[in-house]
Image: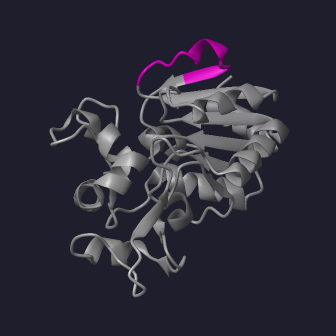
């Protein structure tokens, strides 16, 4: 059965995506050969993007974060737009994403569970005031609130737990769907990768450039770029 046929007969699709969904928009993938993990910094990215590092080396955290994590001039690609189209047509009930770039919402998706938070939400650690990503990008040094508090991005850093409400919403959507499309993820990052275990619907589809450990579980495994594959779907 091909992807178009599966989508045609599906009534409740949930899409679960990782970094590979946004690479076609120009956002670097953490784990690919030219991804952030393989570039040279004073500290490894995993260390910089940890809660401990944010607290102890806030200036160095923001030097990296502003330079590498705030890709604010990028646009959604064919994958983002197709998912928004599927949702509007009543085919897709939710997007669950590991990405923090907000491109699904920018493309028009309404029901998006952001497992790792979003660069577009930032809060003062002292008074809780909200700041947008543009404010963080433009700040010189550590972004501060008028009250003097340090501003922290609403992204899940290493050592931090996922948001319970977001996870519960994603689990409920996955449990209730008849088709789950997993795309652009190596399925190696837990606990997010464990969400596949909640799926008990009819069709499991995997779209990724390379093979994953879950390929054998899928009804259909497609090796290619997510935008190119989804872009061909007729809604």
Q: Residue furthest bottom?
A: 146
Q: Position of residue 191 (x, y in %)?
A: 60, 33
Residue 137 seen from this side:
yes
Q: Is residue 131 magenta?
A: no
Residue at position x 26%, y 76% in the image = 139
> Of 146 and 45, which appears nearest the observer?
146
Q: Is residue 129 left or right of residue 91?
A: left
Image-quadrant location for residue 90? bottom right
Residue at position x 63%, y 47% in the image = 96
**What's drawn in magenta, residue-wise?**
210-221
Residue 105's place in the image compared with 234, above or below, is below
Residue at position x 75%, y 50% in the image = 169
Residue 124's place in the image compared with 212, above or below, is below
Q: Position of residue 180 (x, y in %)?
A: 70, 35
> Of 67 and 59, which appears nearest the observer?
59
Q: Position of residue 42 (x, y in %)?
A: 15, 42
């Amino acid at each position: 059965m091909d992807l178009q046929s599966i989508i045609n007969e599906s009534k409740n699709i949930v899409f679960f995506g990782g970094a590979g969904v946004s690479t076609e928009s120009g956002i670097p993938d953490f784990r690919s050969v030219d991804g952030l993990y393989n570039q040279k910094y004073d500290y490894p990215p995993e260390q910089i993007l940890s809660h401990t590092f944010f607290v102890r080396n806030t200036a160095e955290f923001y030097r990296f974060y502003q330079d590498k994590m705030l890709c604010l001039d990028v646009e959604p690609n064919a994958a983002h737009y197709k998912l928004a189209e599927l949702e509007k047509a009543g085919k897709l009930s939710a997007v669950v994403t590991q990405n923090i770039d907000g491109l699904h919402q920018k493309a028009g998706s309404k029901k998006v569970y952001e497992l790792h938070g979003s660069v577009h939400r930032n809060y003062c650690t002292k008074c809780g005031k909200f700041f947008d990503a543009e404010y963080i990008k433009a700040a010189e040094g550590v972004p501060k609130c008028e009250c003097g508090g340090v501003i922290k991005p609403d992204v899940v850093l290493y050592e931090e737990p996922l948001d319970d409400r977001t996870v519960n919403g994603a689990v409920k959507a996955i449990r209730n769907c008849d088709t789950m499309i997993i795309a652009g993820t190596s399925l190696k990052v837990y606990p997010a990768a464990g969400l596949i275990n909640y799926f008990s619907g009819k069709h499991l589809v995997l779209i990724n450039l390379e093979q994953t450990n879950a390929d054998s579980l899928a009804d259909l495994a497609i090796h290619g770029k997510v935008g190119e594959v989804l872009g061909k779907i007729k809604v």
